[in-house]
Amino acid sequence: MEFQITAYLHLISKHLLCEFILIDYNTNMRKLIFIISALFLSSCAQQYKYVVPQHIQERHTEILYSEVISCPALHGAGIYPYVFINPGKEPNAWVDGDDKVHLTEGLYRFDDDVIVFVLAHEIAHAKLKHVRNRRAVSIVTTGIMIVAGAIVPGLGLLDYVVNPAVTSNYSKLQEYDADKLASEALAECFDIAIDRQVQILQFMQAETKDAGGFWDQHPSWADRIENIKKAP
């Protein structure tokens, strides 16, 4: 019985092989290359698993994050309960469309006061619905340009220039608002005064690239510092 099954399977294999060769060589070769590539990439993905460095684990970011979320000034943010560490070496942070906060390894060259400010700033973005609002502005801008293109043929193509200009400069205003709310949270819940907050931004100014250009999504550090100084 075992011999019969083996022989049957062998015949099936030979039949499938002949079909593979005779039906459509080029199509099957492309499929084969795609399958091999997919398996290779899947293997690489399984082998790579990011491990947060020990010196960052010892900073206990999750505790700071919990304290920042608990600050009354930031209540209602609807933020994801965990912070995500990114292997990027440049100091950076962002909140994504799912309201998850990401910090890069590069931020950990700074002390905990800086980390707290950055966390508060990103959570402020979530509370103020900045990601959603920026998308809405982009969609509305595109809609206006489509209508303009229907009236004046070709004008709609300017959306590739107008949209980035509008959304980038709208984003600058959002950064000011997030800084102000973060400043309020630091003063209220961490007893970090404005003078110390200005120092925090100055530390980051010295270690990161400046912005503020027309196409940049962030204001310059100098403008952000002035904005913090004006906070009540």
Image: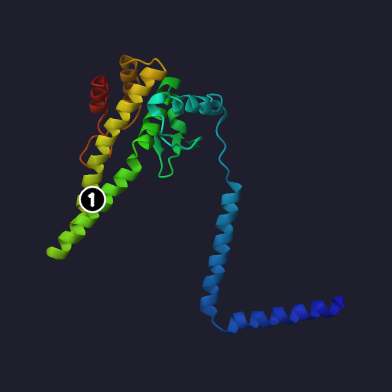
140, 15: nearer the viewer: 140
Q: Quadrant of the C terminus?
A: top left
Percent from the top left, x then y, of residue 140? 24, 52
Say what secondary structure mark 1 lies in: helix
Relative side of 151 to 216, left or right: left
| Residue at 24% from the left image edge and 55% from the top image edge | 142
Percent from the top left, x then y, of residue 13? 70, 78
Q: In which quadrant of the rendered view does residue 173 lie?
A: top left
- Residue topped by disc 1: 163
Residue 66's place in the image compared with 79, above or below, is above
Percent from the top left, x then y, of residue 217? 28, 39
Q: In which quadrant of the rendered view does residue 212 lie?
A: top left
Q: Would you call the spot at circle 1 few (<14 residues within 10 Å), some (14-19), or many (20 or more)?
A: some
Is residue 130 at least partly visible in the picture?
A: yes
113, 45: nearer the viewer: 113
Percent from the top left, x then y, of residue 29? 54, 74
Relative side of 92 to 137, left or right: right
Residue at the bottom extreme of this rendering: 22
126, 218: nearer the viewer: 126
| Residue at 38% from the left image edge and 18% from the top image edge | 188
Residue at the right extreme of this rendering: 1
Residue 89's place in the image compared with 8, above or below, is above
Q: Amino acid at mark 1?
A: Asn
Residue 49's place in the image compared with 29, above or below, is above
| Residue at 57% from the left image edge and 37% from the top image edge | 51
Is residue 160 at least partly visible in the picture?
A: no
